[in-house]
Amino acid sequence: MGVEVGARAARSRALAVLRIRSRALAVALLPAAVAVVLLAATAMGHIGGGSWAAARWAVTVLAVLVLLGAGAVALVVARARPAMSPTVPITEASAPDLYRLVRDLADRLEVPAPSAIALTPDCDSWLEDRTHRAHGTPADTTAPGTGTGPDGARAELPTPPHGTAIQGARPPRRRAPVAPVLVIGSPFLWWMRVGELRAVLAPVVAGTGPSAHPDIAAARRFVRGLDAAVAVASAPGRGPLARTVLGGVGKVARLLLRSCRVHAAEMERGVAAAAAERAQNVDYGVRIVAQEQVGLAYAGWDRLLTRVALPAWRMGRWPSRLDAGVVSALTELSRRDRLAEGFASRLGERPACDLLEEPGAVDEAASLLAARLFHGGPAEPGPGWAPVAWQEYPDEVVDRKWRMDAARLHRVLDALGVSRSSDPTAGDPKGPTLGRVLEHLTDPEAMARRAAAEVGAGSAGAGRTRSGLTESGADADGAEAGLTDAELAQAGFAAAVDPADVVDAPEGPGGELAARLSAEVAREEAVAPPRPAPAGQGPDEALWDDGVLPLFPLQPPRSGRELLADHVTAMVCCAAVDTAGASPGLDWLDGPSLLLRGERAADLTPRVLTLVEDGDPEPLRHWLTELGVRPEKPVRLV
């Protein structure tokens, strides 16, 4: 290990962790040592019977119990499988240029090269130790007499001098130290250029140097073993005896974890500081620019998952090129945001995904893993879990989502007994209409307030014209307040209110509808078929239980108001597509969008919120009239 200050601090903290392990071992052996002393003294005649005999038997029984408990703890800690991040493994045959880049970087840093490379569907990179037996790492993967050198190549091990080896015996098999696995965020490969990726990975790869130190490696194994033992002890489905034994093991493991928590955290900080210090002279200028790309990639990835991928996942479809979508999303961001100007000019350089032999296949595997981690989707494609390409997204996802939501909205209206026609004397139309939704959500009191506001606004405007005054009115409860509300309503926006007042406000016409929609969505999710178990799981895929998925949910459950607004928006979009020639589209930053004459309709949401929250349909009706949408016409549903 190098002479970095962080490396020395990490080693001192690792020794502190190992001292805690030694003290725990000493405490476990102390009763046995006392029992041995008493037995030896009795055998030599230094102590007699009576109370000494009772003490001898008591200490001996205690020593046996403590040794059995310590053995159980040691067995669980040694055999428990440490947690391992779910990743997409990348073999050297599928990415020789990427492996060559990492090895060259390790040579420049004078550290061991990572043993393998894997991708994760997240904007982060790290080193992960996978040398545990449960992770599939064999005890010795080399032939007798061979090992691995500092660069990862196979090298001959020194043979014993002549005359010292046992004749006819096999040479000793040694387990060479295995370097950790380099985990790279898949969005980095598609958005970053090759030079930027090298600069970002430099401090990560430099961490293999401190990780190879025996003391730090031993301390990490001990901490990971304790963490895995706590997980094993907390697992449900045990019998009474196993639950009792594992409960005691879990208490001991938690006690040891609390004892070494501070030292382990400071050890990792020291390792990170040593890696950063070693890598600071490698591509330093490029790394400053690359760090800006890390933040930009994170923003684009989060927006792509929450706005674009999540609607598809909820419909049983998963976009098969999420990483390629990041490039489109960030390019669109650079076009809209002045702060991102100039970032798109980098697209002429060689992207890091060119280091892969088959970037499309890797992107598809990472996209499927992202759907599993962030949404809890199945591990393999199936009839109800099919991939979707970006060019098919508007028709396969956006249009279907709108029509499914509109169909659910009308099913709930049917259950509430809402008439399909606003005119009681007229017959029901041949299909569901947008006018039915508008009539049901219209609040007569809101309409009366609007009429009063408009009258007050006209009176105030006439009074100001006659008097020629330019200052504001003196009466705060007079016509000026009505004018402000009217102007906001005519602009299509609801008046600003305190969120606490909205929560405490009585339910309007949409209150029962929102509650019924929430119940309907929950019912559909409850009766959804269970996810099929994958046919064959690799080491990575078998490390988490389907019951805990998704590991990283993207959004909290939507409220009833949000669900109602989404369903009304979907109904408006269906009516615009069927009666006004609009089309579904995909916005890389905002997800499903309505295209009117090739342009995105960005002013629909505030008008829908005015209808849902205030019961005022006039802004939305004005918008529909301008675009030629006919609310009385039936729309096609799923």
Image (tube, rainbow, N blue to C red):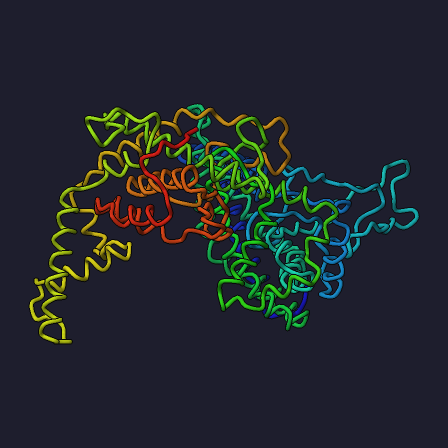
Quadrant in the picture for the C terminus: top left
**In the depicted structure, whether residue 574 falls above or below residue 193:** above
Look at 46% across and 27% down and name the residue there. 242
* Residue at image coords 28%, 29%: 413
Q: Is residue 170 left or right of residue 69?
A: right
The outermost residue toward the right is 162
Q: Relative to 106, is 567 on the left or the right?
A: left
Residue 318 to residue 478: above or below: above
The N terminus - image quarter: bottom right
Q: How many marks?
A: 0
Q: Residue drawn 51% across and 61% down?
A: 266
Residue at image point 84% right, 46% down: 146
Left-right relation of 53 to 177: left
**Closer to us: 194 or 304:** 304
Q: Is residue 37 visible?
A: no
Pick whichever, 276 or 218, lies toward us. 276
Q: Position of residue 491 (x, y in %)?
A: 28, 57
Q: Horizontal and vertical percent for residue 480? A: 13, 64
| Rendering quarter of residue 567 | top left
Place of residue 584 in the rendered image (x, y in percent of width and height, measured from the top left): 48, 43
* Residue 488 seen from this side: yes
Nearest to the observer: residue 232 or residue 203 = 203
The residue nearer to you, when weighing 76 against 581, is 581
The percent position of residue 391, horizontal first and vertical second, equals 58, 43
